[in-house]
Image: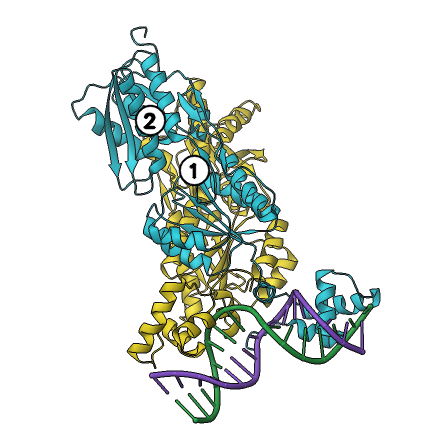
Chain colours: A cyan, B yellow, C green, D purple
Amino acid sequence: MKNNKVSLAEVAKAAGVSKMTASRVLRDEGGFSESTRDKVMAQVERLGYLPNRLATVFAGDKKSTFVGVSIPDLGNEVFGMVLEGIDRKLGAFSHQSVLGLTQHALDQEESWIETVLSWQPAGLILTGRSHTPKSLVMLKGAGVPVVEIWDLNSSPIDLCVGVNHFDSGYDMGRYLTGLGYRKLGYVGTSHDTANAATARMNGFTKAVQDADGQVTRHLCLHDVPGFYPGYYGTEQLLSSGAEIEAIFYQNDNMAVGGIHYCAARNLSVPGDIAIAGWGDLPILSILPYRVTTVHVSHLKLGQVAAEVLLASLDGTPTQDVHDIGFRLVPGATTGQVGRI
Amino acid sequence: MKNNKVSLAEVAKAAGVSKMTASRVLRDEGGFSESTRDKVMAQVERLGYLPNRLATVFAGDKKSTFVGVSIPDLGNEVFGMVLEGIDRKLGAFSHQSVLGLTQHALDQEESWIETVLSWQPAGLILTGRSHTPKSLVMLKGAGVPVVEIWDLNSSPIDLCVGVNHFDSGYDMGRYLTGLGYRKLGYVGTSHDTANAATARMNGFTKAVQDADGQVTRHLCLHDVPGFYPGYYGTEQLLSSGAEIEAIFYQNDNMAVGGIHYCAARNLSVPGDIAIAGWGDLPILSILPYRVTTVHVSHLKLGQVAAEVLLASLDGTPTQDVHDIGFRLVPGATTGQVGRI
DNA sequence: TTGAAAGCGATACCAA
DNA sequence: TTGGTATCGCTTTCAA
């Protein structure tokens, strides 16, 4: 006994009862007298006893109340809000998030999965649908519910809560081509696990091609999709020589970067360049005009993910795949071609 | 044995050795032959054995590799970056963050502390210097290192990594009054644990009063300090009737909200209103002019916090209080009074 | 209503 | 180089 930690046995001894009786009192399990309860609780108070939940889980051979949550990065609000949604909901049901920042790298996710599983978590919430083969083996053998979030996945490992990114990109492509644009650009970043963004880009490209248009892409490598990459990504795209009428960005922060680039170069939006973002992020709320974007509720996505997991732990049946949905928000940064 | 989990005993039996031998092989402790190692590892592979770290911690009566990390919210990048700094550093040394979103409420922090301590964490990182009396008792009795971050605290529970918020506010007040402003405004939000922001506000106010100026404050209640509260907080401050020459905001996102409000009202910055923010947040990187702000490295703050904790676990002596520092960045949104 | 004993999965310690 | 046994703090099970 090296930690000066007080154990249940000590409490029991001090209270003059057996460990079992003390244990029953603490779990409020019933089957003890009021006077016994008072004796025990008095000692708990006096000794400052804190239970060792490791031992509890261990002895009961049950799961802990840990939920492993893997998140690619926290450099912008997107995944921050997802995580906030998850943790708030989990916390309300006394579960704890064990965080894993994967930095968009599958092998980092793999080693984190191995570690977190060794702590006997109650369940896992993973961002993204791609995992290494070894990860898949571990996840399937873990015997705990796994919720894959962000990307909608028709055949998830277990459960899935997400958005149909391809469709949202496709809708934006259809919207912009519907306005008459044919020479389109895409500006985003490039990451191992940025499948969702890639799906949006692919959906967008497909829609544009379906309308006989063209997409010129520019991906900023090794960057998180923030304001500044949006700014210089726009610069690089436009200076590539390609003729561009409208640009779709990986997210709104990048789009705002693009808007500021245009302002700095005296390019009118949408007159010279139309601009569309994704996510309906907070920055849009203060611009003096509405930016064309795709609304997605990140907080809700996280909350639903947590709910689905908790329901699964509870044994409550739910559907395997939850589509959070999205909504294209037309704005003033895209216009009718030829009518500006 | 309800989980179909494979235990060390099964691996050992399958390999034809004792538990102890298998344990030694897995920990690569030495003291076994190559052939033994091969036999054991073959079975580990075949059975897909994953160790139960609960048992390890428990048996060794040691601490886990959990680090409890309490964060007020993740609604903007500020604490997201702090958390990213912490988790990256911890991850590199194979520790895991157990997240606690307190939503700026001390009683939420308290109940989270109680829970997380019951998991025998290796240490704790807490945002803020205020804690409930019960929290303090638990923290002091926990016997694990506690790092309080964000607010610099000359008498921390244990260790502290932060910024001198009061001084940063004071410097900004001195800077603005040095430019000739005397009728100042402050726009922020109000939270239980927003002591850091309050300290900045107080420092600012003190400096302004020292220069015989006045500060009119406007606090947006129940809001996280983001773009939109900055926008309408500015509106409310300016419509309060007070004469204002310059406004200091709780952070840059709010300041950008203020800048946009001014643009929408055709108020010139800094001609009609000077604006200063705090934090040097990403949004500033795309504005066509430099915004007067205070630079703080949030990522570094998190990294140093993790380093200090790891050093303490390691037994390496470090100083108790680490000042991350700040740097006032003069910009174009504040000017010389009368010279605009 | 209460308690004694066994056991969870691993490691520490001592023997062989 | 290998293995037996006790042990961590708590819960389960069975008896009293």
- Amino acid carrying label 1: it is Trp
The relative height of residue A311 versus residue B41 in the rendered view (above or below) is above
- The foreground one among B50 and A113 is B50
Residue B24 in the figure: left or right of residue A4: left
Residues indicated by labels 2 and 1 sit on the same polypeptide chain: yes
Pinpoint residue A12: horizontal percent, then vertical percent: 72, 73
Q: Quadrant of the N terminus of chain A?
A: bottom right
Which residue is at 36% across, 74% downward? B25
Residue drawn 16% across the image and 23% down it? A241
Element under disc 2: helix
Which of the 4 quarters of the picture holds residue B17?
Answer: bottom left
Gap in Å between the C-alphas at discs 2 and 1? 16 Å
Label 1 sits on residue: A150
Crowding at dot 1, Cα within 10 Å, few <14 / some 14-19 / many 20+, comes out as: many
Q: Which residue is mark 2?
A: A203
Nearest to N terminus: mark 2 or mark 1: 1
Kindly identify which chain the residue marked by label 2 belongs to.
A
Q: Looking at the image, how many numbered discs can be counted on the residues?
A: 2
Where is residue B61 shown, x and y percent of the image?
52, 73
| B107 left or right, relative to A156 | right
Question: Quick one: which residue is furthest to the left in this view?
Answer: A241
Residue B104 quadrant: top right
The answer, for residue A169, to whether it is visible in the render is yes
Q: Amino acid at mark 2?
A: Gly
Residue B330 vertical placement versus B99 (above, below): above
Q: Nearer the viewer, residue A340 or B5?
A: B5
Q: Residue at x 51, y 37 (%)?
A: B212
Quadrant that contains the C terminus of chain A: top left
Q: Residue A28 at x, y = what percent?
A: 74, 60
